[in-house]
Amino acid sequence: MSADLELLRTGEIEVVGRILDASNSTLLCSITGNDERSERCVYKPVLGERPLWDYPDGTLAGRELASYAVSEATGWGIIPPTVLRDGPFGPGMVQLWMERDEEVDLVDLINSRPAALRRMAVLDAVINNSDRKGGHLIPHPAPAGTPLREREVWGVDHGVTFSVEDKLRTLLWQWAGQPLTADAIGVLERLREQLDGELGDQLHEHLTVAEVRQTATRVERLLRSGRHPLPSDDWPSVPYPPF
């Protein structure tokens, strides 16, 4: 992982093309390190962000990095390696491109309820993800015949996160109201501690004081209830379009 982050932080970025179905400027790039290692990455320049009335503070790129920091703190490795750095069009988020298993039907994957998506549902509840679409799920390549319930999945596109208002919108409501797993409870307990330390310091670099405080409140709420959250009656519970 450290080698991936070093490549993202210091490699030379060359724009290959634009990902057209993204709402903000999202560029597919190649990135080459001093050791000649070359990978593909996604670059989202702050300059190309569309202003959002309900996310007036900071940048979407900063929220992407904050989401990655929380993902790393969980130990679940849900979000691919992500950094903030200068690029061809100024500062922006740079994230390692992960190859999707195109043989996996996303509807079938979601309906199979793999443990990976249950973990992602917990992460989304913590970061208050308001846009967990099907297209933001990247199934890992796996040997032929691997059951969908055993598949690992990356999550991408976390620019609209950490609102102080409850805005959880997701396709992952399959566990709504169900008890959290022992693993999830242990992770949340560690997050509660880390938000008072290094993780909290990391988030303060990109979020407001109120947003970091509310993140800690969401963690505490999940621990008190011991259950996955239920959809809100005050906010659409599923993103549109869902895929």
Image: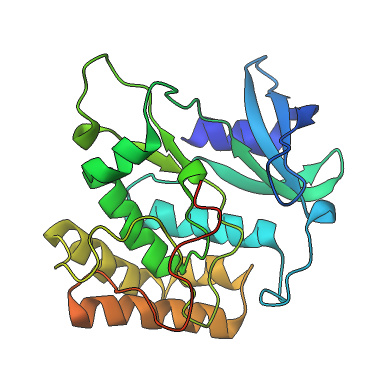
Question: Taking 91 as reference, is 177 above or below it?
Answer: below
Who is closer to the viewer here, 8 or 153? 153
Instruction: Determine the image quadrant of residue 161.
Output: bottom right
Q: Position of residue 225 (x, y in %)?
A: 20, 80
Q: Position of residue 133 (x, y in %)?
A: 49, 51
- Give the left or right position of residue 89, taking residue 4 as reference: right
Q: Position of residue 63 (x, y in %)?
A: 60, 62
Q: Identify the residue at horizontal 51%, vertical 42% (top origin).
A: 135
Q: Identify the residue at horizontal 73%, vertical 42% (top origin).
A: 26
- Give the left or right position of residue 120, taking residue 138 as reference: left
Question: Taking 242 as reference, is 122 above or below it?
Answer: below
Who is closer to the viewer here, 59 or 12? 59
Question: Taking 58 as reference, is 37 above or below it?
Answer: above
- Give the left or right position of residue 118, taking residue 85 as reference: left
Who is closer to the viewer here, 3 or 66? 66
Question: Taking 211 as reference, is 83 above or below it?
Answer: above
Q: Position of residue 17 (x, y in %)?
A: 78, 28
